[in-house]
């Protein structure tokens, strides 16, 4: 890692503790990623980003702040990036995916809280993540109860705006979400000092759609019989998409897609023929949570698709670009985002439809339904998901895990047995 100590110091970070994190990350990345064979060359971009994950992008964000731009930190795929970008703001994801941050989260939250929330709160309060120090404003949402209450705690430490999510998807709920998007736009305008015009919003809608299309192109190649990229590498691309500049993200994902499309034509696979194709569904995997993918892909399986928020839920469906007035555009944004099917909605039958569709499209041999410990939403929805898969004749394994390694061997045993059974 290059030397960014001065920058971290100026951000008020706990340098001593941060050193501990910096000490383990390269080894973890080396063990999980660099040990893979025949990786696509284009992954060099993401390797470089991870190697300096707390340096390069934070330094860029600070440079932009010096020019007067504002950084908005978000935790959920329902928060519309388009609105922020239309006001010349910058969005960065803030979800915590490391056990390292959990103890600082547990200092203020019940232990029986989902690790994603504990890590996100801990990353801020423990002062060990530059992204959490840089963001001028945090944007939360009322998706799950744990998050809702966590925002109240974070709101004491940092400017926090919370978007009120509907719980259902009736026409009136879409209208309510549209109003919520408009309210958010007013807050963004006030924070950035910039006015959102239809022209600027059209431009930002286009930018984010292009990013979605590029990510989708990479996923498309994973439907082929040969598997041109590991699930771990695809996951890494998705995780960094939340932090990166959207235009660069699209450019890099398109470059990777070019290479993968060529690999498919040439019959190049990163797994031996006959490797079992796995769809992972469930709770998101924030960086650096690579645990499940690593276990699957070192147990005889290949992850070919993720029906998660660090997977298809992030990029499927585009915002309609034909609107010319702000009202039409906010409506189009609301409609696209309400097409994401998170377990926080009821009913949420569309998610089951998505999983069955994706299982077919990606020609999977089996599905692993993963739940982050204490996420009651996905845990409960697991019942209908797994029932529907069994009825469709698709083998499914439900697992619950957290960010620790305590259950890694037990998981490996179960996953190996599941993959063997697929044979
Ligand atoms: S749209 S999945 S990003 S809410 S795993 S914190 S739900 S207790 S992350 Fe999520 Fe938005 Fe839904 Fe996606 Fe709560 Fe569950 Fe934890 Fe979760």
Image (tube, helix red, strand yellow):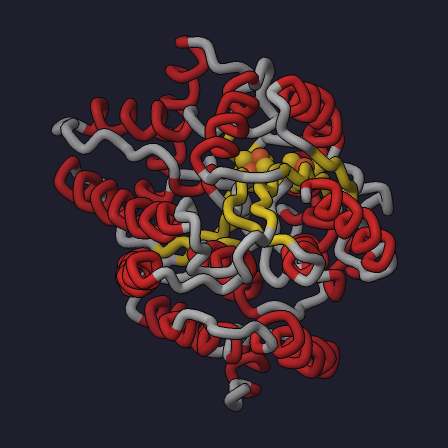
Q: Looking at the image, is 206 positioned above or below residue 15?
A: above
Q: Is residue 318 visible in this depiction of the protein?
A: yes
Q: Looking at the image, is 108 positioned above or below residue 33?
A: above
Q: Tally the marks.
A: 0
Q: Is residue 107 visible in this depiction of the protein?
A: no
On the image, the x and y values in percent for residue 83 come to: 32, 41
Name the foreground residue: 86 vs 404: 404
On the image, the x and y values in percent for residue 152 come to: 67, 40
On the image, the x and y values in percent for residue 12 come to: 61, 74
Which residue is most to the bottom? 3
Name the foreground residue: 391 vs 405: 391
Name the foreground residue: 157 vs 164: 164
**In this rendering, position of residue 395 left or right of residue 318:** right
Q: Residue at x 56, y 18 (%)?
A: 348
Q: Looking at the image, is 386 positioned above or below residue 174?
A: below
On the image, the x and y values in percent for residue 125 come to: 70, 60
Q: Looking at the image, is 308 positioned above or below residue 335?
A: below
**In this rendering, position of residue 317 left or right of residue 274:** left
**In this rendering, position of residue 197 left or right of residue 404:** left
Q: In which quadrant will I find the C terminus?
A: top right
Quadrant of picture, ligand 1:
top right
Name the foreground residue: 254 vs 388: 388
Q: Residue at x 69, y 33 (%)?
A: 396
Q: Residue at x 56, y 29 (%)?
A: 342
Q: Quadrant of residue 380?
A: top right
Q: Residue at x 51, y 48 (%)?
A: 304
Q: In which quadrant will I find the N terminus?
A: bottom right
**In this rendering, position of residue 222 left or right of residue 167:** left
């Amino acid at each position: 890692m290059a030397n960014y100590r001065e920058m971290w110091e100026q951000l008020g970070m706990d340098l001593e503790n941060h050193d501990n994190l910096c000490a383990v990350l390269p080894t973890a990345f080396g063990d999980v990623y660099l040990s893979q064979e025949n990786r696509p060359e284009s992954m060099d971009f993401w390797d470089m980003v991870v190697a300096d994950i707390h340096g390069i992008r934070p330094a860029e964000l600070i440079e932009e702040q010096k020019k007067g731009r504002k950084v908005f930190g978000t935790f959920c795929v329902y928060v519309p990036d388009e609105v922020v970008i239309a006001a010349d703001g910058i969005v960065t994801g803030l979800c915590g995916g490391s056990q390292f941050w959990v103890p600082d989260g547990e200092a203020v939250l019940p232990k029986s809280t989902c690790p994603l929330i504990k890590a996100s709160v801990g990353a801020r309060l423990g002062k060990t993540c530059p992204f959490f120090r840089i963001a001028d404003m945090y944007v939360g949402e009322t998706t799950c109860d744990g998050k809702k209450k966590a925002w109240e705690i974070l709101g004491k430490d940092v400017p926090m705006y919370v978007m009120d999510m509907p719980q259902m998807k009736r026409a009136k709920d879409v209208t309510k979400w549209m109003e919520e998007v408009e309210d958010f736009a007013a807050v963004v305008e006030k924070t950035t000092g910039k006015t959102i015009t239809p022209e600027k919003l059209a431009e930002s809608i286009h930018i984010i759609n292009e990013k979605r299309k590029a990510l989708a192109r990479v996923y498309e190649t994973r439907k082929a019989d040969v598997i041109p990229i590991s699930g771990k590498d695809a996951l890494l691309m998705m995780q960094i998409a939340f932090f990166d500049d959207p235009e660069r993200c699209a450019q890099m994902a398109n470059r990777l897609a070019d290479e993968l499309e060529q690999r498919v034509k040439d019959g190049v696979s990163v797994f031996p023929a006959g490797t079992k194709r796995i769809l992972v569904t469930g709770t998101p995997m924030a960086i650096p949570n690579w645990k499940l993918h690593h276990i699957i892909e070192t147990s005889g399986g290949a992850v070919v698709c993720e029906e998660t928020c660090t997977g298809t839920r992030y990029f499927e469906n585009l915002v309609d670009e034909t609107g010319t007035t702000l009202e039409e555009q906010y409506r189009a944004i609301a409609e696209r985002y309400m097409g994401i099917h998170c377990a926080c909605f009821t009913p949420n039958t569309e998610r089951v439809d998505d999983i069955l569709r994706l299982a077919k499209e990606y020609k999977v041999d089996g599905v692993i339904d993963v739940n982050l410990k204490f996420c009651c939403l996905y845990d409960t929805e697991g019942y209908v998901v797994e029932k529907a898969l069994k009825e469709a004749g698709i083998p499914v394994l439900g697992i619950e895990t957290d960010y620790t390694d305590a259950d890694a061997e037990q998981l490996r045993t179960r996953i190996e047995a599941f993959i063997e059974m697929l044979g």
